[in-house]
Amino acid sequence: MFELFEKAVLTALGAAALTQKKGEELIQEMKSRYKISEEEGRAFLDRIQEMARTGQQKTAEVAETEVKKALDRMGMVSRDDFEKLERRVRALEALSAESVTSQPEDECLG
């Protein structure tokens, strides 16, 4: 499942890189075709890049949500949930061991 998430993130990163390259090409075309200034072209590219970053973040969030849903459907717990349960079991074991050792000897036999 992590591989699916990783692929989704890498795809989003690739899309962002592609957007950068295409943005540069678009600026050059706009400069020649529409006679815009370099500053206007850069401002336009900045807006495109911000849209790409936003899209990338949304893609990562959607991928993470979908992976979590798939794990839930398969009955798997998250690492955080597992670690919480592990800490709880250790605490209960320690409490149980402490309780056994703190009982008077005649109560333990008895």
Image (tube, rainbow, N blue to C red):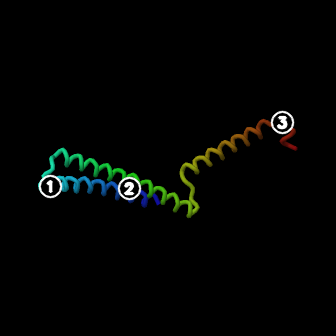
Q: Residues within 10 Å of mark 1 (few under 14, many from 20)?
A: few
Q: Residue 9 carries which label?
A: 2
Residue nearer the viewer, 27 or 92: 27
The mark lying in front, picked from 1 and 3, is 1
Q: Where is residue 108 in the image (x, y as percent from the top left)?
A: 83, 42
Which residue carries the number 3 mark? Answer: 104
The earlier-in-sequence mark between 2 and 1 is 2
Q: Please, what is the three-letter code of the amino acid marked with disc 3?
A: Pro
* C-alpha separation, residue under disc 1 versus residue under disc 3: 92 Å
Residue 60: quarter of image: bottom left
Q: In this view of the protein, which residue sits in the foreground, 34 or 7? A: 34
Estimate the spatial distance between the alpha carbons at disc 2 and disc 3, rounded to whole Å: 59 Å
Tag 2: amino acid: Val
Q: Residue 33: x and y, percent?
A: 13, 57
The percent position of residue 103, horizontal first and vertical second, equals 81, 37
Amino acid carrying label 1: it is Tyr
- Mark 2 residue element: helix
**Left or right: 44 with respect to 110?**
left
The 10 Å Cα crowd at callout 3, few under 14, some 14 to 19, many 20 or more, is few
Q: In which quarter of the image is residue 22?
A: bottom left
Q: Is mark 3 on a helix, strand or loop?
A: loop
* Of the image marks 1 and 3, the number of the one nearer the N terminus: 1
Q: Residue at x 46, y 55 (%)?
A: 64
